[in-house]
Amino acid sequence: MKVTNLKLWLVLMSLLQSVSAVADLTVDTESLHLQFNQQGDLLRVQACFPACADEGAKTRVLSATQGMLVFGQDKATVLQLKREYNNATTTLSFSEPSGRLLHRWQVPDKGWMISVTSSGAETVNLMSGADFRPAPSSGFGYLLEQSRYIVFDGSSAEAIGMDDTEQGPRLSQGWFGFRNRFWTAMVLPATPISFTPVTGELIEDARIEIAGVNSEKGLALNLYLGPVEPKALSRSAPELESLMYSGLWFWLRWVCQALYHLLNGIAMLIPQWGLAVMVLSLLVGILMRPLNKIADRLQDQVHEIDARLAPTLASIKKNHRGAAQSEKILAMYKEENVHPLYSLKSLAGVFVVIPIFIGAFDMLAENIHLSGESFLWITDLSHPDAFMQLPFSLPFFGGYLNLLPFIMTGFSFVASKLHSHPAMDADQQRKHARNLVLMSLGFLVLFYTFPAGMVLYWTTNNLISVIKTLWKRHRVSNN
């Protein structure tokens, strides 16, 4: 009887130790929830920004169902786990029953960087899962929501689409991994390795096959598993910040970074991201006012020249054709002391606006702070405002009525009606108004499926333009 009880007690103790061992494979840090299996594979990764305990923290599961980082090794052997905690870092050591160390993970309490060394596997797969896939989107918004591979040598980043042609092995010369709009998994090898991004028409989830070049050195990898956010990236590894807006020229990246820091500064004073975006649009308009005044003055000069030349030009076009017409027009320019390309002055306003347009576009598109933030009827500023679901789905435009792009276009129409120049005759004013209306309709199509935060910025910009025009008219009428 005593022997039976002893056996039962030993079985219960064995089960308790097994449960305890499994529970010990979960590691929670300030910004990461990690789960490992008995073979040392990293099974599940949930990343948080800025911290998991913060109210309203952004979270995302990065891993695939079969694991995040899985070693290519014999899974039949159950490894022994030794868990240690020292200097604010959790260390997980996985060894064979003989005592030979196979894998060692080091997980700091803070940040999104972890590391692993392995002497027991020559290959490893880094994978994303369904939770990492882009949100369903339509129109041009689809372009923003694509997951892609990133190969980064410290100065420039190469993007590889999931549906690109089949990729061959590459020797690592820096960081590589994959990202979506707001989250990324990046690897920096500490030992020579080759890697192969798996691509193809039907590929939905990322998978990178990593192989050690020198079997004696094994594998040593540093991993960043976290948000695409400047401070988070730079604190983890200074060179990683260059992943932000990596597809732009360096001076446009400066514009994006300046707008990002300005928006964050506004949000510290106005803890509502929708209002902060509107204030950003207002402040950018104020800061750009000197350049806009120059552009407006050049535009006015073009309008005045157009009005002065219009009668003579109309007469020449009516009475002459072909080469004779061209000669008469050139003679008119010479007589009036006007350069034939004078109308290019009107493009000054475009050259002023385009860099800010691109900067605001990219900054708001990659701004994780807007993810999940609501404003008025908008449930998420990082996606279209989806004011009302339609009973059908339209090609390109999708199955929701997005109200904000129509409000933006409405302000553009009002601005086009109000905008005129005293020097323009009725025909010129009609042509000018028509061009502005066509441009507004083009922006409606372009912006309709863009995230609400981006549309809100330009809606505010158009509203400010209407208010400025009305104020100018009021001042002129009073004088």
Image: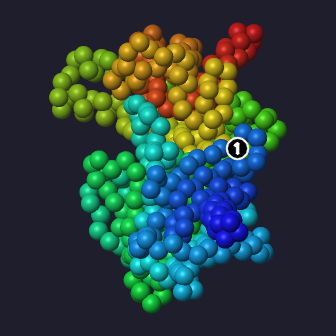
Q: Is residue 141 above or below residue 16?
A: above
Q: Residue furthest left?
A: 322
Which quarter of the image is occupied by the N terminus? bottom right
Q: Is residue 181 above or below residue 286?
A: below
Residue 286 seen from this side: no
Secondary structure of residue under mark 1: loop
- Amino acid type indicated by mark 1: Ala
What residue is rendered at 57% in x and 86% in y?
99
What residue is rendered at 67% in x and 15% in y?
470
Residue 462, by quadrant, is top right
Residue 353, by quadrant, is top right
Q: Is residue 277 above or below residue 241?
A: above
Q: Nearer the viewer, residue 330 or 300?
A: 300
Q: Nearer the viewer, residue 99 or 375?
A: 99
Q: Residue furthest bottom?
A: 216
Which quarter of the image is occupied by the C terminus? top right
* Residue 392 spot, x, y in % from top left: 38, 15
